Image (cartoon, rainbow, N blue to C red):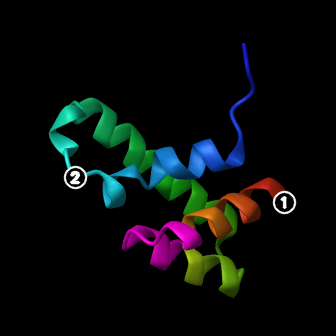
């Protein structure tokens, strides 16, 4: 089984911002994605650059999602 990369984790957590067809996800999956997003926020809280990237990623900005993945790799 392959290890999940930080990029995959960030993409999963912020998919809601990128998905045009969010109806594909079940309500339970959306709840889990929200929990994951909150955990990422908790891990990166206090790092102003990471928080800025998180805010932008939540708006659907792909380059900032990549930055979030980079910060996740560090922690």
**Label of residue 74 in the image:** 1
The residue mark sitting in front, 1 or 2, is 2
| Magenta stretch prevailing secondary structure | helix
Outermost residue on the right side: it is 74
Residue depicted at 45% across the width and 72% down the height: 61
Identify whether 29 is placed above or below 20: above
Sooner in the amino-acid sequence: mark 1 or mark 2: 2
> How far across and down, in percent of the image, does residue 25 sit?
25, 34
- Look at the image and give the residue range highlighted in magenta: 54-64
The quarter of the picture where residue 9 lies is top right
Residue depicted at 19% across the width and 45% down the height: 21
Identify whether 20 is placed above or below 56: above
> How far across and down, in percent of the image, does residue 40 sit?
59, 57
Identify whether 64 is placed above or below 19: below
How many residues crowd around disc 2 within 10 Å: few (fewer than 14), some, or many (20 or more)?
A: few
Relative to 2, 20 lies left or right: left
Query: What is the secondary structure assignment of the residue under circle 2?
Result: loop
Quadrant in which the C terminus is drawn? bottom right
How many residues crowd around disc 1 within 10 Å: few (fewer than 14), some, or many (20 or more)?
A: few
Outermost residue on the left side: it is 23
47 within the magenta span: no
Residue depicted at 47% across the width and 78% down the height: 56
Q: Is residue 75 visible?
A: no
- The residue closer to the viewer here, 21 or 75, is 21
Relative to 28, 66 lies left or right: right
Quadrant in which the N terminus is drawn? top right
**Label of residue 20 in the image:** 2
- The residue closer to the viewer here, 14 or 32, is 14
Residue depicted at 21% across the width and 33% down the height: 24
Query: What is the secondary structure assignment of the residue under circle 1?
Result: helix
> How far across and down, in percent of the image, does residue 42 sit?
60, 63
**Label of residue 54 in the image:** none
């Amino acid at each position: 089984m392959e290890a999940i990369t930080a990029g995959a984790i960030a993409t999963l957590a912020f998919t809601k911002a990128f998905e045009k067809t969010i109806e594909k996800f079940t309500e339970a999956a959306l709840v889990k994605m929200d929990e994951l997003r909150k955990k990422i926020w908790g891990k990166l809280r206090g790092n102003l650059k990471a928080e800025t990237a998180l805010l932008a990623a939540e708006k659907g900005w792909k380059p900032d999602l990549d930055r979030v993945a980079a910060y996740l790799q560090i922690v």
